Image: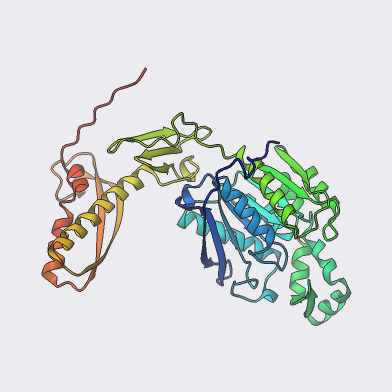
């Protein structure tokens, strides 16, 4: 397996890391961090990964942060979050279990899909590895999965409080010490992990899988990796971390794992095949090219800017970017806002902000009161303009009139002719 270029030969990728939060499966607010290449929206990244941390850990472990940084170097975006009741997330740990962790992963994927795009790479460390294996089946957008020191059976974690198991069963809940910190473990938690069938789900994944494990792992034995690997179907890969410990506490172990994950993932998330990638287009010219290995995804070069377009999963796309109609609406909305701003500035009116909501649909011509044609269907764009500022009613009305004068609005409502030629 070829590793990414060494740091000396590779131009570093600036990383943007932002704190975000979203509602977990139980309604509690989950604390998260979204890492992505600077200057690139997370939804336009080469791949969008989710990282699930180890049992009683957090999103900020050395392994999580270093692996996220390594993937960002290769153009990926990574969401890492704290499960309910852990780290900076709300909720009580005592009310959670393995099933709620899986549900939190599904909630995180749903949030990503609504705000950026659906995740296509899952990475799980320790019990988080078992959780991503269990959750992947409900995420059709996922192309590849990585486990690090994952148990084949979630019930394996019960050994951490074997001496208090009888008391937990009797009293219903007992405070136990894990890694020197107190956690309240309940009877329902024990019963939940004993009823998980993760290996059965592994056999039906049909996704690329990379199993990473340390032979000397004293927390989760190497045999667990063997069971996961044996249950999985191809394509599957295995990486031994030699003398690393379970938490990858040595910086070089986490860095090496990050390098290999990034190199392995590149196979499933290839760069767009373009002979002039990185070449800025002349002003006023846009180039659109299909992305190799995808059905509908397109890269868009406009000047020195690169965008991406795609279709949603529901129609066979990868949901890796806005649809063509989304981009059309975005162009109208941006032009409208800019035109209103320019007019207000020229008049020295106290306009603070303009925000615009747009929606496109096809309607029957007979339902359109202002349309000349009464046959077939016509395109209808709904545009709602929000104007903030200490403006009087007359000024607001004037700005709404000016909105209709934006160049893109005039283009869309005027006569448009498209000339098409073909190269060789």
Residue under the image location 68 percent in, 74 percent down: 93
Is 387 or 234 nearer to us in this picture? 387
Relative image position of residue 169 (x, y in whole percent): 82, 77
Task: Please tell me in which quadrant of the rendered image residue 390 appears.
Answer: bottom left
Is 207 or 7 nearer to us in this picture? 7
Is 158 or 240 nearer to us in this picture? 240
Q: Is residue 297 above or below residue 176?
A: above
Quadrant where the N terminus sits is top right
Task: Please tell me in which quadrant of the rendered image residue 267 appears.
Answer: top right
Relative image position of residue 97 (x, y in whole percent): 70, 68
Residue under the image location 63 percent in, 56 percent down: 51
**Residue ranking furthest to the top:** 424
Q: Is residue 306 left or right of residue 227?
A: left
Relative image position of residue 200 (x, y in whole percent): 75, 49
Q: In this view, does 119 lie to the left or right of 264?
A: left
Residue under the image location 56 percent in, 60 percent down: 108
Is 174 or 180 nearer to us in this picture? 180
Number of numbered tags placed on the structure image:
0
Relative image position of residue 155 (x, y in whole percent): 80, 62
Q: Is residue 398 left or right of residue 142?
A: left
**Residue ranking furthest to the bottom:** 171
Q: How is the image coloured?
A: rainbow
**Residue ranking furthest to the right:** 163
Residue under the image location 78 percent in, 69 percent down: 190
**Residue ranking furthest to the front:** 8
Quadrant where the C terminus sits is top left
């Amino acid at each position: 397996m070829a590793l990414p270029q060494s740091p000396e030969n590779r131009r570093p990728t600036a990383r943007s890391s932002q704190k975000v939060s979203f509602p977990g499966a139980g309604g509690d607010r989950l604390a998260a961090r979204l890492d992505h290449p600077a200057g690139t929206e997370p939804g336009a990244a080469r791949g969008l990964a989710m990282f699930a941390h180890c049992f009683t850990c957090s999103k900020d472990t050395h392994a999580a942060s270093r692996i996220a940084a390594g993937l960002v170097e290769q153009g990926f975006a990574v969401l890492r979050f704290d499960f309910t009741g852990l780290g900076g997330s709300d909720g009580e740990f005592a009310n959670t279990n393995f099933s709620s962790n899986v549900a939190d992963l599904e909630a995180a994927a749903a949030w990503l899909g609504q705000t950026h795009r659906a995740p296509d790479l899952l990475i799980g460390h320790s019990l988080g590895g078992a959780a991503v294996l269990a959750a992947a089946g409900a995420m059709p957008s996922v192309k590849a999965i990585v486990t690090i020191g994952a148990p084949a059976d979630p019930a394996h974690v019960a050994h951490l409080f074997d001496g208090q198991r009888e008391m937990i069963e009797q009293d219903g809940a007992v405070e136990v010490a894990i890694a020197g910190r107190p956690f309240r473990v309940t009877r329902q938690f024990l019963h939940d992990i004993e009823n998980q069938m993760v290996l059965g789900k592994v056999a039906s994944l049909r996704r690329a899988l990379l199993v990473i494990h340390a032979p000397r792992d004293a927390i989760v034995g190497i045999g667990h990796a063997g069971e996961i690997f044996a249950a999985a179907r191809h394509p599957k890969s295995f990486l031994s971390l030699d003398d690393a410990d379970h938490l990858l506490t040595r910086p070089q172990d986490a860095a090496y794992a990050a390098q290999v994950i990034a190199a392995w993932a590149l196979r499933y998330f290839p760069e767009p095949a373009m002979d002039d990638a990185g070449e800025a287009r002349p002003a006023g010219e846009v180039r659109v090219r299909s992305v190799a290995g995808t059905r509908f995804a397109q890269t868009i070069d406009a000047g020195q800017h690169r965008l991406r377009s795609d279709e949603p999963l529901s129609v066979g796309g990868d949901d890796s970017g806005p649809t063509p109609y989304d981009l059309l609406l975005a162009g109208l909305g941006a032009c409208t806002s800019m035109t209103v701003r320019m007019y207000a500035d020229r008049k020295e009116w106290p306009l603070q902000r303009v925000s615009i909501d747009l929606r496109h649909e096809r309607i029957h011509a007979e339902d359109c009161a202002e349309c000349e044609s009464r046959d077939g269907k016509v395109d209808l764009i709904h545009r709602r303009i929000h104007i903030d500022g200490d403006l009087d009613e007359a000024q607001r009305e004037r700005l709404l009139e000016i909105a209709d004068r934006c160049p893109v609005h005039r283009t869309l409502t005027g006569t448009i002719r498209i000339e098409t030629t073909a190269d060789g």
